[in-house]
Image (cartoon, rainbow, N blue to C red):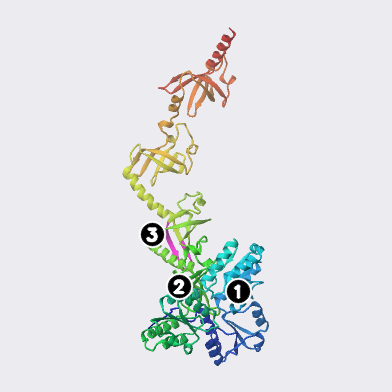
Amino acid sequence: MKVYLAKTAGFCFGVDRAVSMVEQAAKDGLNAVTLGPIIHNRHVVQRFAEMGVRQVDEVSEIEDGCAVIIRSHGVSRAVYEELEARNLTILDATCPFVKRIHEIVRKATERGRQVIIIGTRTHPEIVAIAGWCDNPVVFENAAELQAWLDEDPARTNLSVTMVSQTTSTEALWKSCCEIIKKVYTNAEIFDTICGATEKRQKEAIALAGLCDGMVIVGDAMSSNTKRLAMICREHCKLVSLVDSADELDTTLFSNVQSVGITAGASTPAWIIKEVNNHMSDEIRVENAAMEENFAELLEQSIKTLNTGDKVTGIVTSITPTEVYVDLGTKHAGYIPYSEISSDPAAKAEDLFKVGDEIEVYVVRVNDMEGTVMLSKKRLDTVKSWDEIETACEEKTVVEGVITEENKGGLVANVKGIRVFIPASQTGIPKGGDLSQLIRQTVSMKITEVNRARRRVVGSIRAVTAEARKAAAEQIWNEIAEGKTYHGVVKSLTSYGAFVDIGGVDGMVHVSELSWSRIKNPAEVVKVGDEIDVYVIGFDPEKKKISLGYKTAETNPWNLFLNQFQVGDVATVKIVKLMTFGAFAEIIPGVDGLIHISQIADRRIGKPEDVLSEGQEVEAKIIDIDEENKRISLSIRALLVEGDDEEYGDEE
C-alpha cells in the first residue's frame, strides 16, 4: 500500500498564529484564558489547559485582571466592547482573513446595505461576523438564498453586500454568486474564502480522485475538516474522518492499494504524523519524506519578515481592494491597491492572476495581527532606480511621459521615477511653450542620479542632438543646389529667417522670402512655421547653407500674366498718388500706372482731385510691357465706353 500525504495538511497561518499567541501567553506566565476554544481541536485545547491557559465560554466567567485571548474565529462587536468595558487585557487571535470580513460588513452597514453571509449559522466565525453588522441574513446553501429572494419580490430592490465563511466550498460560493448576479446589478460580492482553504480543498479533490481510500484528520467540530470529508466522499468511496491515530481503523484499508491523508486547518502536525505512521510501519520512505517536509514547514513558520525585505509569494486571491499573497509564513500577506502600481489606471486583474508567483517588497509587519503589508509598486520602483542608474552610467536612451511643467522646466515619469528636465534640455527654444510636451512620450538620456536625495535629471536635447548630428551628416552628403526640403522656422533676424531642414539650419535672406519688398521677415513667416525651401548655395567648409523661399510659382508677375491680359477690367487699389498719375495694386506684388490723362473723362489739375490712397476703383488694362514689367491702366476708358453704350441705347 502507498500512502500520500497532502502538502497543505495541517495548520493554516491563521491557526498557527492563534496557537503561537496562546503558547507565548503561557510562556510569559500570564493569567490568561481563551474565550471559547482557541481553535476547533480538543487535543490543542487540552494541551493549553495543562499549560495553565483554560477555556471559558462566557465573558462573565472571566476574572478581573485576566488576559483574555480571542479565538481565531473572532467575536462579535458587542462581546469585544464588553471586554473593553471591563478593562481586560485583550490578546486578539482572530484570523486576519476573518478580521477583514468584520470590516467589510461593518462598512456595508454604515452605508445602509443589506449584508448576506454564506456559511453555517451556528459556526462561531459566522456568529462573530453577523455581530459586526445590522440585520444580516445567513444562508447555508444556494436553495435557501433563492427561497429568501422568492419570498419577497421587494428584496430585489435592496443594495446587497455578500461575504462567505472563510472555510466554505468554492462550489457553494459560486452557486450563490450566480443567483445574486442574476438579480442584482449593484451587488458587492467579496470572495472571502481563505486562499489556504481553497488550496487545501482542491488538493483533497485531487488526492481523492487518485487514491482508493482517504483519511481526513481533524476534530469533528472543525467546519473546514468536515467540509474536507464531504468533498472527498464526492470523489472517493472509502473516506474515514479521525480525530487522532487512536481512532484510526486500519482494517478498513486492508484491501486498498493507495491511501491519501489530508487534515483540517486546526489539526496539529504531530497528530498528522501519528496517523501517517500508524497506517503502516513498513512505509518508511514516505515517513522520512514527511519528516523532512514538516521540518521545512516548521522553518517556514518561524521565518521572520522585516520591513524592506524582498520576498516571493503566490497570489491566492484578488479582491476589489487588495491582492492576497501566500508567503509561506504564518503571516497573511496583502497588497493594497495603492501599492500595486505607480500607474493610477492599472487594474489588479490585468497585472495578476491567482497562482502567479510574484516578487514584492515588505512595507510593514504586524505580528500582533499576523499580517504583512506588501508593495509591488515599491519593489518596481527599487528596480527602476537600478535601471535608471544603469542608463545614466551607460548613457542609454530611456522613455518617459511628461507629467507637468514647473518654472525650471518639465517633469517626466520614467518607470515610476520622477525625472526633472531643465528647460534648456527640453529641446524647446528659449521662450517657447513647454506645455506642448505634457502627456507626450519622449526619449531622453539620464544625466544625473542621486538616489539619496531622490533626484534624477534628464535631457531630451541630448537625444535630439545625436539624431540631428546623424541627420546633418546625411544632408551634407546629399545636398545639391535646387534640392528642396521641408523645414521649420527656428529663429528670425532683421536680415532673414533660419530654417531647420532636418538636422542643419540654413538661412533664407530677407530678399528671398517674398517677391514683394518687405522690411522684416516677420511679415512673411514666424517661428515654428513649417515651410518648403530650396538650396540656393552652400559651403561645406563653413557649414553654411543659403535657402530660397520664393519660387516662380509664387512670383506675382507670373500670377498676374496667368490671370489677366490687355482689355481685362480689374478692381484695383490706389496705393500712391504722383503728379503724373496714380499707382494702383492689381494683385499683391503687382502695381499698374493710371496716367493723369486716364483718370477721368475730362481734364483734371492733379490726381488727388479725383482719387485718394486706399480707394478701390474699376480700371481697364490698356497695355502690358512684359520686358520691363510695366502695366498701364485706365479709368477713362471705362467711362468713355459707358457713354458710348448709353448713346447707342438712345438711338
Instruction: In this rendered view, identify the residue nearer to me: 607 or 405.
Output: 405
Q: Tell me what residue is drawn at x 61 percent, y 71 percent.
A: 105
Q: Tell me what residue is drawn at x 55 percent, y 13 percent.
A: 640
**Residue corresponding to mark 3:** 396
Position in image of residue 82 (x %, y %):
67, 81
The answer to whether the residue labelled 1 contacts the one labelled 3, judged by CB atoms less than 8 Å apart, is: no
Going from the N terminus, do you reach mark 1 or mark 2 first? Answer: 1
Marks 1, 2: nearer the viewer = 1
Residue reaching furthest to the left: 477
| Inter-mark Cα distance, 1 to 2 | 25 Å
On screen, residue 225 above or below 619: below
Instruction: In this rendered view, identify the residue nearer to me: 592 or 372.
Output: 372
The answer to which image quadrant residue 51 occupies is: bottom right
**Residue corresponding to mark 2:** 313
Residue numbers of the magenta segment: 444-456
Position in image of residue 542 (x %, y %):
34, 44
Marks 3, 2: nearer the viewer = 2
Circle 1 packing at 10 Å, graded few (<14), some (14-19), many (20+), is many
Going from the N terminus, do you reach mark 3 or mark 2 first? Answer: 2
Q: Is residue 446 magenta?
A: yes
Mark 1 lies on a secondary structure that is helix
Q: Quadrant of the N terminus?
A: bottom left
**Residue corresponding to mark 1:** 102
Side (left or right) of 426 relative to 577: left
As shown in the figure, which amino acid type bears the numbered disc 2?
A: Gly
Marks 1, 3: nearer the viewer = 1
Instruction: In this rendered view, identify the residue nearer to me: 520 or 284.
Output: 284
